[in-house]
């Protein structure tokens, strides 16, 4: 089964930056307790979806920011 890409270039960069920033803030103790755990989870999901360029939530809502023509 082939998975179609649905996360485009700008969307991908935002996900990678936000995911990395959240994980860094939790790791460097800027966020503690429950907020750190949430930052780790949200950051990991953002990084993963940015790396693989596929977001399951986009499939549910019918969103696609990836364009086959441009990339």
Image: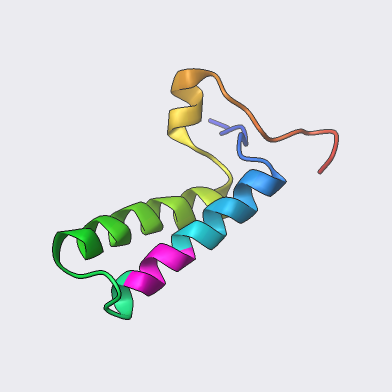
In the image, taking residue 42 as reference, residue 49 lies left or right, namely right
Q: Main secondary structure of the magenta part?
A: helix
Give the image location of residue 67, x and y in percent.
Answer: 76, 33
Give the colour scheme of this rendering: rainbow
The image quarter containing residue 4 is top right
Tell me which residue sits at (70%, 47%) in the image: 9
Tell me which residue sits at (24%, 65%) in the image: 36
Vertical placement of residue 52 versus 2, above or below: below
Give the image location of residue 59, x and y in percent.
Answer: 49, 24
Vertical placement of residue 45 versus 39, above or below: above
Q: State the extent of the magenta-drawn residues as a range.
A: 20-25
Q: Residue furthest bottom?
A: 28
Tell me which residue sits at (85%, 33%) in the image: 69
In the image, taking residue 44 as reference, residue 16 lies left or right, namely right
Instruction: Examine the structure image and report whether residue 11 is included in the region drawn in magenta.
Output: no
Give the image location of residue 61, x and y in percent.
Answer: 48, 20
Question: Is 37 in front, or is 51?
Answer: 37
């Amino acid at each position: 089964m082939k998975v179609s890409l649905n996360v485009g270039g700008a969307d991908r960069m935002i996900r990678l930056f936000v995911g990395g920033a959240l994980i860094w803030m939790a790791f460097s103790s800027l966020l503690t307790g429950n907020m750190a755990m949430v930052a780790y989870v949200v950051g990991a999901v953002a990084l993963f979806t940015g790396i693989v360029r596929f977001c399951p939530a986009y499939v549910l809502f019918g969103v696609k920011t990836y364009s086959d023509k441009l990339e």
